[in-house]
Image (cartoon, rainbow, N blue to C red):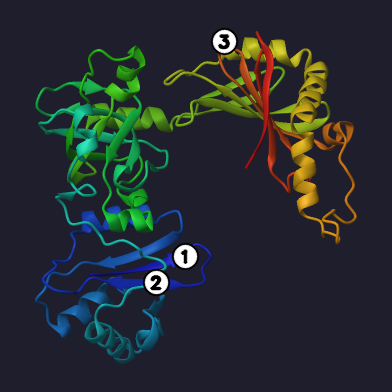
Amino acid sequence: MFWFGKKKDKKIYSVGNNFDGEIKGASWDQVQLYIDKLKDNYEEFVTLAIEKPISKVSFVQAAWDNMHELDLEVGLGYGKNKKLMEKKSNIEEMTQTLLEFYNTGNIQNIDSFRSEVKLLPCSIGTGKIPDWEKDNFESKSEEYLVAIGGGSACGSGVKECFTASFPILGYINLKTGKKSDIMSNLRFAPTEEEKERSAYFEEFNKLMVYKIRALAPKLIESSEPWVNNTVRMGGLFGLEMLSAKVPDEFLDGLIEKYKTPVVIKTEKYGELSLKKDLHDFEGEIDWLGEKAKLFLRVERDQESADEVLTHMDAFYKDLAEWDKRLREFAAKELTDLANEWQSSDCEIDDDGNPINFTEVTKADFAKKLSIESMAMDNKGNFSVFYYDGGLFFDHSVVVDGSLENGIDSASMQG
């Protein structure tokens, strides 16, 4: 099987194949899944999937048939195999290049295509649940249809306790018929190779329905109430990918709902757009003459911001006073640390003292800060991010607090 891809910058095309061993060529649906993963970087593809054995003549003819209507310029492989193939009117020259490609085999542009096309069914990661997770999930697996969300995958844990997860919009248990529309996570255990290359980010395509075999979360008794929270109980542990692009009215509906923008218009803060994976409304505000990003945190599946807007209004009406207090608090907590950072960047004289070092005062510290962003949640808790003005060599100064209790901490982050 081989494929061609034209990058959006129109600079190069890439080609790869998996004519090795007894591996069969992927079906078009499976190839399309792989292409979908790369669509953010590639704008055109022509793909040919072939099962061995196949003659060189039929290989070349099939390739030519696929490429005939395209204006292609294709880079083939690396090293001895690296050459440029352009579409020409001379079919003999094209045929010769394709024959070389067929004969060399194992050509792969590893910079552009870092994963093999999956032949379904296949395991999700290792296809097993690690021992340390077994108490959290049921022991018997079942088949599900699951809608993958639009957010990014993530990994958590260290070494043998590492798992990856994809956001999901909901699922259907194919045995019981149970339907869930809870935004949660599909977790799985990546292979060592997937962990090394962070390839687990490519395990699933966003906003697509898959049929999988998975484990349901187990209700943990005699624990804190938060352990059995809605999000955990709405998740799954994936073991096997059975099929993809499965049509289903319920799950397709969740995907369409997710894709529908949610925007609220406010008099003070303009338009605020809901980022559904992050559970916040985002926009931009005027902060005493400077522009600042605004993040209003809401609960999962919440599509209104009335409560958090009330808290934001209370903060914003006294913005000048809050800004003054935030800067002064940060200066009180962090000026000594800033001087340590500044002196560490100076040359040292024979007595061990920094040369040409000017001590930063608290007033200097407060003045150097410039607003970056602010986040407020529906309980009145807030975090304000300032650019550090070079005090910590371009990190952020973050001040946390609440409307009820005032400012409680300041830190350097980033």
Q: Which mark is residue 194?
A: none
Look at label 3 and name its amino acid. Glu
Instruction: Say which quarter of the image contains residue 359.
Output: top right
Q: Residues within 10 Å of mark 3 (few under 14, many from 20)?
A: some
Is the Cβ of the residue at disc 2 closer than 8 Å to that at disc 1? yes
Left of 274 or right of it: where is 267? right
Give the quarter of the figure containing the C terminus: top right
Residue wearing tag 2: 14
Q: Earlier in the sequence, mark 2 or mark 1?
A: 1
Q: Residue 223: x, y in percent?
A: 29, 15
Instruction: Say which quarter of the image contains residue 319.
Output: top right
Left of 8 or right of it: where is 382? right
Mark 1 residue element: strand
Tell me the CA gap for discs 3 and 2: 51 Å
| Front residue (pair 243, 161) | 161
| Front residue (pair 276, 366) | 366
Q: Residue 140: x, y in percent?
A: 10, 31
Residue at image location 19% in from the left, 62% down from the top: 26
Look at label 1 and name its amino acid. Lys
Q: Residues within 10 Å of mark 2 (few under 14, many from 20)?
A: many
Q: Residue 36: x, y in percent?
A: 35, 53
Residue at image location 20% in from the left, 23% down from the top: 218
Asked if 287 appears above or below 370 in the picture, the reply is above
Q: Earlier in the sequence, mark 3 or mark 2?
A: 2
Residue wearing tag 3: 307
Residue at image location 33% in from the left, 50% down from the top: 200
Asked if 139 appears above or below 117 in the picture, the reply is above
Count every numbered label the image shows and give the total: 3
